Image: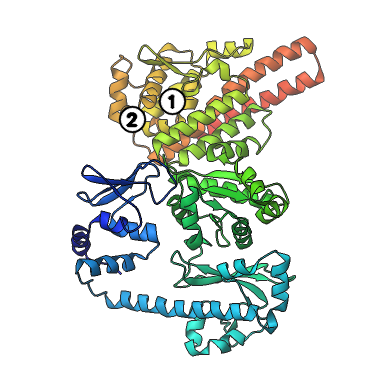
Amino acid sequence: MSLPPSFLDELRARTRVSAVVGQDVKLIKAGKEYKACCPFHSEKTPSFYVNDEKGFYHCFGCSAHGDAIGYLVDGRGMAFMDAVKELAAKAGMEVPAPDPQAKERAERRACLIDVTEAAADWFREQLDGIDGGAARNYCQGRGLSRATLDKFGIGYAPDAKGKLKKALDRFGVPKLIESGMLTAPEDREPYDRFRGRLMIPIRDPRGRTVAFGGRIIGDGEPKYLNSPDTPLFDKGRQLYNLDLAQQAARKADRIIVVEGYMDVIALDAAGIGEAVAPLGTAVTEAQLQLLWRLSETPILCFDGDAAGQKAAIRAAERALPLLGPQRSLSFVTLPEGQDPDDVVKAGGKAAFEAVLEKAEPLVERLWRHERDASPLNTPEERAGLKQRLFQHAKAIEDQGLAQLYREEWLKRFDALLGRGQQRGQARGGWQKRGGKWTPPPPPASAAARDIARTGIGGPQVAALLRGYALFPAALKDDVETLAELPISDPLLARTRDKLVDAAFSSESLDRDGIATILASDGLGAPSKSLLGFSFTRAGADEMQARQDLGAALGAIAAAAEVETALNEATTRFEAELSDEAFAEQQRLLTAKNEINERLASLSESD
């Protein structure tokens, strides 16, 4: 239902936030504000403040923030309209009548909830009935106590096509189909969707049953069957057990994501109630937002098999654009072949807590994944690793955080190649001296020193620098790689240094601003290259130009590494005259030619 902004503004004006929050939290007067220990996370020193004059609450510990309506929604799990109605009643205001369509949708949802709640009751009855023997034996074998069965509302769907349909015939077939309780093939009569399965209710944050997960008893496929998406249920926007876990999560100051229903139930039985699970899909953006309401760094706990690790990486990549100073993830990998149930059965709660203590931050998990994704024996393979890492950093929309991720991964990359000590500690080895960013010391080997002295092709570098001057937004993504290029031409090197300094110092990165920065040192824009790259023309399509810039920079950077390795291989061959040394020299010559061809393919003929 859409409410007029004027109504909501009046409602907020008539409502004291402290009166709403004070029903749940003991508030202490602190000047014009109130303070308390935060109800959204566990703390001993108050960092939660309520300001009636400004009409909001804010926690400086977990960043929880909102008005009176928001507190009822986030703090008590109320639906938005229910929160509005409760506050309006206390303020003596009448909620505007909904438009007919919104009213119809609300009534339809209410009717469907009646159906799913009735189905949940019926499934629980069947578990204790004549047909539920096999299901009861299964529960006993899984160690599910009566208290656990009752807490999670677990039931049983008999292996028959029409028993639920008959039991709930008072609702009518259309509502049973719409709620997901019946399936309706085109050529047959509708029949029970769930048959011969242990039934696990899926509840919304208010604890109302909106869908089900069914676990087959014995052998068969699919092992788990979920309700379809309905007006009540969107599997990508809900989390299993969120209704019970949110209070436990705030008390424990953490939220744990596991793979399935039974993992959640097993952890709860072991005394870890702050666990939730996605509903048959990879963790979605909407689910991440739900998790971040409860914890700054949700812990994702996946099985150690290939499927579990693939799910972990998908979740990490999906989270990247949403990351912020108080929003991240950490990851736990269980021993291969074990799930949370196995861990707690073998060692109880303490064993699982020990696993959680080894959680990896997102930055570490992605680094390890990309580092181990392929061999790193050749310059091309190492360049590929750097490119993949920088692509991940590029996905982070918070530019300050993206820069920190690039710096962290570049530091690890340098350490992996044994050159971390040479590069120093700041920005990939560049350090600011006398108000100017200066490059790191040259590489140690004789061949590498030769590359640093002679540099790489002047025309290509000139084209590259012209591209970054014309399309300076690309510097945010490529500055570390650009900073490392060994450039022998003094004017081009000074131009590069100016561009890098601007990017590192967060100065203006628009085209006019870059021109001003370069002109201030008498450099001007780089001379136009005779090479026909798209990015050397001011009127080129920006997306294509930026894409070609990144590809050209990667090729030129790889050329420098290949040239270094080729000089070393040539020196080794001259000393050894061995077949192995000759083969390595020829492989690197081939790689050098391939890089030149890659650069040529980016050039356009006018």
- Disc 1: CA contacts within 10 A as few (<14), some (14-19) or many (>=20): many
- Residue ID for mark 1: 463
Q: Is 354 in front, or is 316?
A: 354
The amino acid marked with disc number 1 is Ala
Q: Give the secondary structure at mark 2.
A: loop
Q: Give the secondary structure at mark 1.
A: helix
> Percent from the top left, x then y, of residue 413?
58, 27
Sooner in the amino-acid sequence: mark 2 or mark 1: 1
Left or right relative to 451: residue 577: right
**What number is the disc on residue 503?**
none
**What number is the disc on residue 509?**
2
> Percent from the top left, x then y, of residue 429?
50, 19
Distance between mark 2 and mark 1 Cα atoms: 18 Å
Q: Residue at x 51, y 87 (%)?
A: 173
Q: Is 60 in front, or is 185?
A: 60
Q: Quadrant of the N terminus?
A: bottom left
Q: Residue at x 73, y 72 (%)?
A: 137
Q: Quadrant of the C terminus?
A: top left
| Disc 2 and disc 1 in contact, CB within 8 angstroms | no
Q: Is 548 in front, or is 380?
A: 380
Left or right relative to 350: residue 20: left
> Percent from the top left, x then y, of residue 568?
68, 15
